[in-house]
Every structure is written in structure tokens, then in C-alpha cells.
Amino acid sequence: MRLALFQPDIPQNLGSALRLCACLDVALDVIEPCGFPLSDRAIRRAAMDYGGQADVTRHDSWAAFLNRRDDWPQDTRIVLFTTKGAEPYQNFQFGPHDILLMGRESAGVPDDVHNAAEARLLIPMRPGMRSINVINAAAMALGEALRQTQGFAPTTPIA
């Protein structure tokens, strides 16, 4: 299971994604360009003390991300979360190698990215609401996907 952020706009959301992925033991793909300067130092700063725990891969572009497809397991699917999705995420059957793709906070994803996804899911919301914060949506999506695939990391009780 992987989480991918398409051209994130807000550095604090990247920091939250790094922490989320580190805690859930899920790899994170950052598809650039970002709406803010992104450097390894900026990633460490955004992640606070979780930066060393997160498995992060940066991609220069959408094309560079797709060019890595040969490295993915055969059954990998790109699962896009979008307000234009056709299927509620809780009705979808996730697989252990799915990449959960979140769009840009300000604009979602362009048509070519939308069309490249094997599935387009939505999070049901109250009528009249535009969208949920991208990392809150990612946490909901990862929670359901990891639950379905028994992919949660083993826990150790805190003493």
C-alpha cells in the first residue's frame, strides 16, 4: 500500500502526510512540482521527528511517477480519491498493492491523471460541502484500505 500526493500545495499537509505514513508504515510518493519549495531539508522540517521514519519517494512529474510502473507489483492499481468519483470508497475492494492518490488541494488532478486511475472513489459528504482536507481524506482512505487488507502494522503496547 502506498499514498501518493499529486503536486501538493500546502507544506503543512505534506508534514501531516509524512507523519501519517510513518505511523501507519505506508510508503509516500510526492509527485512534483509542489506549490512550495521542496527540498530534503524542507521534508525533514515538515515531518518533525517523523522524517526518518517515513519511506518517501519524490517524483519530478506525473510522467516520472508513471515511469516507475515497471517497479510496482503486477496487481498495483492507482486509486484516485476525487470529488468527481463514481464509487463511494467504503464500497470499494482494496488490494494490498494499491496506490491511493490524492489530488492537489487547490485543483484536484488534471484529466490525464484522472483517466490514468484504475478506480475513482469519493468520500460521501453532506450536500453542499466541497471537500475534506486532503490529509484527513487520506487518513480515512488508508484506514479503510488497511483494514480491508489486514495491512495495519503490528502494535506494541505503550508502557
Image (cartoon, rainbow, N blue to C red):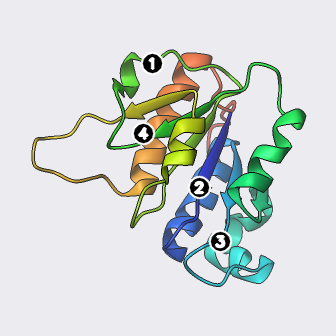
Left or right of 149 on screen, residue 139:
left
Left or right of 21 on screen, residue 123:
left
Q: Which quadrant would residue 98 be assigned to in this image?
A: top right
Q: Where is residue 158 shown, x and y percent of the image?
A: 62, 45
Q: Secondary structure at mark 3?
A: loop
Badge 1 local density, few (<14 within 10 Å), some, or many (20+)? some
Q: Secondary structure at mark 1?
A: loop
Which residue has dot 4 on it? 140
Amino acid at the residue labelled 3:
Pro
Which residue is found at the position 69% from the left and 79% from the top? 38
User: Where is the N terminus found, in terms of image quarters?
Assistant: top right
Which residue has dot 2 on it? 5
Which residue is found at the position 57% from the left and 34% from the top? 117
| Inter-mark Cα distance, 2 to 3 | 11 Å
Numbered tag placed on residue 92 in the rendering: 1
Badge 2 local density, few (<14 within 10 Å), some, or many (20+)? many
Query: Is any atom of residue 69 visible in this view?
Result: yes
Amino acid at the residue labelled 1:
Phe
